[in-house]
Amino acid sequence: MKLILLGPPGAGKGTQAHYLMDRYNIPQLSTGDMLRAAVNAGSAVDKEVKTIMESGNLVPDKLMIKLISTRLNEPDCENGFILDGFPRTEEQAHALDAMLLERKIILDGVVSLTVDKEAVIKRIVGRYSCSACGMGYHDTLKTPKVPGICDGCGNESFTRRKDDNADTITARLNAYFEKTAPIIPYYKKSGKFIEVDGMQKIMDVHNAIIKVLEINTKH
Ligand SMILES: [Zn+2]
């Protein structure tokens, strides 16, 4: 199963990626992870990436494509992959397509999770977690059974991420809608585009994705 996963922050991409990884036994290829791995590894491509990152510059698209292409040779990609965080621009989408075409790799789907902006802000801003076991909560959507006490471990202290505030979330959402959302029409034309409402319950989102994927891949 070869997939691209698109969606703004708060769309539940990470959660859905995990369910897809388990179901199809495929890795999630996040560009952040690939770049971090490159800095610690030793191939020619890795060294090139390392030099650029250490100089404080952005890794050019061409090199990012090379890095992804190399990553696809790893044995864990035998059953496919989920590409997450790439492409982010139309140029990157074209470059990625050219590489996949050259390697005769055919995508099974480009999954796009849609969200309601206001609801996402509410979803993210209210979240917090147990500082001992990490169990996640929300001010209104998921409170502990006994107020102030973690359901999982009984701990009484909780933490909030600093960037889970309305201003930061709004800025990140706007960046997605301005820069990445314009690649959606490009993928819509490919016939592989799967749009799913990311505001549904987690398992409903998952089932909606696999329903389309399994129709698409049935030959
Ligand atoms: Zn806990």
Image: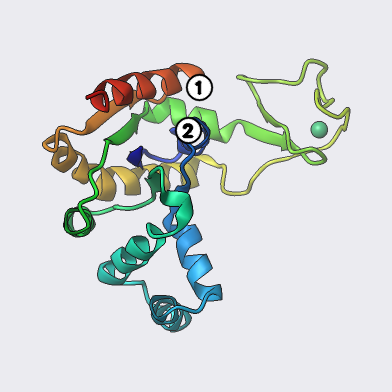
What mark, if any, has residue 202 been given in the picture?
1
For residue 91, side relative to residue 169 (left or right): left
Asked whether residue 108 appears in the rendered view, the answer is yes
In percent of width and height, residue 40 lies at 56, 74
What mark, if any, has residue 185 been given in the picture?
none
* Residue drawn 26% across the image and 23% down it: 218
Q: Residues within 10 Å of mark 1 (few under 14, many from 20)?
A: few
Q: Does the residue tagged 1 have its C-beta within 8 Å of any atom of ligand 1?
A: no
What mark, if any, has residue 12 been given in the picture?
2
- Are the two marked residues, 2 and 1, in contact with CB atoms closer than 8 angstroms? yes
The quadrant of the rendering that contains the C terminus is: top left
Front-most of 168 and 116? 116
Residue type, label 2 = Gly
Q: What element does badge 2 sit on?
A: loop
Front-most of 60 and 40? 40
* Residue drawn 44% across the image and 23% down it: 206
The image quadrant in which ligand 1 is located: top right
Location of residue 187 (image quadrant): top left
Q: What element does badge 1 sit on?
A: helix
Q: Is residue 97 above or below residue 209?
A: below
Work out which residue is located at the far left of the displayed protein and give it: 189
In percent of width and height, residue 29 lies at 44, 51
How many numbered discs? 2
Front-most of 208 and 13? 208
* Residue drawn 40% across the image and 45% down it: 81
The quadrant of the rendering that contains the N terminus is: top left
